[in-house]
Amino acid sequence: MKITELQAYRQLAWSFRKKGYSRGKKDNMPIYSWNNVKYIPNNLTPGHYVYAMNYGYIKLKDIPEKYRTREFFLHTLSGADDEIVKYVKEHPKKFDRQFFKDHIATEHYGLAFEFNDFEYMPLEFIDEEMVDCAMFESIKMRYTERRGDCEDWFYSVYKRKPEVLTQELYTLGARCFARKQNGKNEFLNITPEKYRTSEFYFALCLNNDTPVMEDIPESVLTTEFLVKLLNDNIENIQCFTNEALEREAVIKEKGPMKFWQAAIMSDGYQISKIPLNDERIKFFLSLYDKNSPEYEYGFKNSYRNYLREKNSMPEIRNDANNLATIMTIVGTCLGMDNDMAISFGNQIMKASTNRNTMLPIHFEQKVPIKYAKKYDKEEYLREIYRKIGIKILKEADNYYYNVILPANISVVQDNYGYCVKDSKGKTLIHYYDRGDFHNRTVIVDQINVVL
């Protein structure tokens, strides 16, 4: 469900129009690049100073008064810039109510950070119209322009003037801002009990990838409520508690099913959002083959992690990459430029990879149809290794196995990567190891052996 389809949004928009409220006007003053502030251009404008200020080339004290225009402050005022905030606070007569409305429309960063607009604007400016403008801009910024969240303003209003926050704003805030992290849902905690309606909790769960459902009263979590969530968007399964996942509902033409089963059956990729156990793994594998995209991109990685945890296997360490990172930092400290330092780190990474005792974990090509239901790509590659007598000892890191090569097998470098050859010089396997240590790809791209 789009946020604009929520009843709370419709009600807020209707009330805003009925009361004759208006949004601020976005200022479109041209901003001109000005990197060399020692050179004064002939056509110097406030827009040049905006650029220089925002990129840290100049301070407010260096800007002549005539260039400190209303438009200049609309583009430079931000909760992240203490100098500009201090100036605005010290000159309240220059910044009226309309300025803040226009600033919200012009610069969304005015709604973010500790010193957002609502943290210091005159208290009489904080009213229903102003907070509605902020909410509409937050929604636009997140869902239309997709530039992230800016919830700080809401908490500032809650602290300074909570009586202007309405049912609709809390419900929309639940959709936009609420997340449960480190065992705490800060937005839920500030929401008055009277505003925690079924619609509020429904909005809280929409497209929320944190465990917000843990804090919803059982009286709200009816089967009807859970069905409504999944009918809205199957991805809402990601916030379900384990108890909710295990609850059953009657699915058309399927009969009684647990919610996690219904989600997986509807969209196999949802398995990545559901905690694994043996029953869920078995059910998924009964529906999706190992050659399916759902297995490859939705299941395989979480399944490997599940097995690792279940079997108490040690966490994989990327020692070569970590060493390369450290040596890059060392290179920078020794005065190397960025590219040279990264190159230095890459050399360390390559030197730390023993081609005679390490072979790749991952396979790029499709598994032959004959074996596609039995093996996934990594399982098939392991079978190929065994076929030619290579013994796998363990995973060395996320890229390589530690292996023992038989006497008739060797690894040699070519122009495109590395060849695993037999004693007659035939290439049995080809792989490449590309990219910098921070963006590395190691993968077998060719197999010339059949099982």
Image: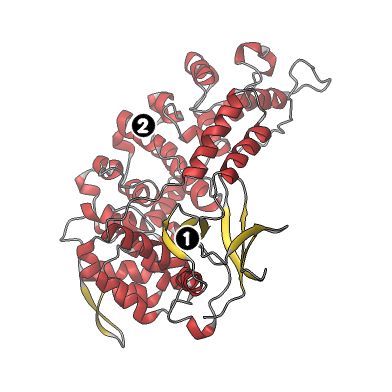
| Mark 2: amino acid | Ser
Q: Position of residue 320 (x, y in %)?
A: 51, 44
Point out the residue furthest to the bottom here.
253
Q: Is residue 104 visible?
A: no
Classify the position of the N terminus by image quarter.
Answer: bottom left
Depth check, front residue: 239 or 129 = 239
Against 172, residue 60 (above or below) is above
Residue visible at 27% across and 60% down in the picture: 311
- From this viewpoint, which residue is outermost toward the left? 219
In the image, residue 39 above or below residue 426: above
Circle 2 or circle 1, nearest the eye: 1
Residue found at x 36% / y 65%: 303
Give the residue at mark 1. 404
In the rendered image, residue 179, in percent from the top left (x then y), is placed at 33, 47
Could you tell whether 338 is left or right of 179 in the image? right
Question: Closest to the observer: 285 or 85?
Answer: 285
Q: Residues within 10 Å of mark 1 (few under 14, many from 20)?
A: some
Position above or below: 185 against 100 = below
> What kind of residue is marked 1?
Ile
Q: Which badge, 2 or 1, is on the more N-terminal residue?
A: 2
Give x and y (percent) for residue 261: 30, 75
Q: Tell how many labels.
A: 2
- Rendering coords of residue 448 (x, y %): 62, 75
Tag on residue 156?
2
Badge 2: how crowded within 10 Å, few (<14), some, or many (20+)? Answer: some
Residue 29 shows in the view: yes
The residue drawn where x is 37% and y is 37% is 154
Q: Secondary structure at mark 2?
A: helix
Give the spatial CA distance, label 2 vs label 1: 62 Å
Does the CB distance between marks 2 and 1 fall below 8 Å? Answer: no
